[in-house]
Image: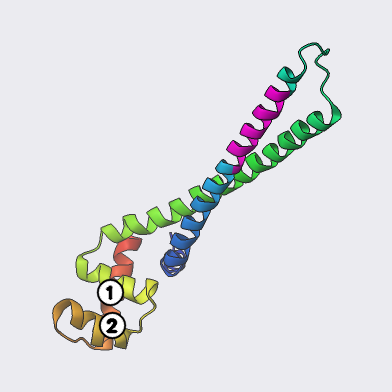
Amino acid sequence: MTKEQLILLLKNYKENKAKLKLKLREKESILRKIESLKNVSLSVTSYEENSNIHSKNIITDKVGNKVSDNLDTELDLKAELERVENDIKELNTKLEEVDIRLEALKYKEKEILVAYYVEGHTYEDIGENVYYKLFNQKRSTRNIQDIVDKATQKILKI
């Protein structure tokens, strides 16, 4: 992995996490729609089979069209579900990549790296506020920049 790829993953971490939550919600919605189509299809066919026992069990156009439409819709929903599941796998892979690499860092390195890349703080802001909140000390922008560079190199070696 190159430094540019890593930085891009870190900068997009929050966005990817939000996208993952939305995709999971979309997946649940699609599954509910598929389940409701199955319930409608079962109720229509059950009604059709039992409605007129003395008939020759010929499906009327109305019932046949409804079942056919449900099957087409179900196939479309399954294709959409597969696409959403692929997106979920891709987003999970990106998030896990970042999480695994951040686990290798010490607490201070991790917090400063996350503050810089993920949260978008400046070196000066990190030195004045973030570092102060963590350790009750202030650091110069040069010190923070060195910590970010070393932490980035450290997780690139993994």
Amino acid type for the residue under numbered disc 1: Ile
Label 1 crowd bin: few (<14), some (14–19), many (20+), radius 10 Å: many
Q: Is residue 53 magenta?
A: no
Where residue 90 sits in the image (x, y, percent)? Answer: 50, 51
Residues under labels 2 and 1: Cα distance? 7 Å
* Residue 15 relative to residue 118: left or right: right
* Residue 78 relative to residue 103: left or right: right
User: Bounds of the magenta span?
Assistant: 33-47
Residue under the point 48% across and 56% down = 20
Quarter of the image where one finds residue 50: top right
Residue under the point 35% across and 62% down = 156
Secondary-structure class at tag 2: helix
Q: Residue furthest left?
A: 136
* Residue 66 relative to residue 108: left or right: right
Contact between labelled residues 1 and 2, with CB atoms less than 8 Å apart? yes
Q: Quadrant of the C terminus?
A: bottom left
Read off the residue under disc 1.
112
Read off the residue under disc 2.
126
Quarter of the image where one finds residue 95: bottom left
Label 2 crowd bin: few (<14), some (14–19), many (20+), radius 10 Å: many
Q: Magenta span: helix, strand or loop, mainly?
A: helix
Residue 158 seen by the camera: no
Task: Decide: is 104 above or below 53.
Answer: below
Q: Is residue 35 magenta?
A: yes
Secondary-structure class at tag 1: helix
Residue under the point 71% across and 40% down = 73
Q: Residue furthest right?
A: 61
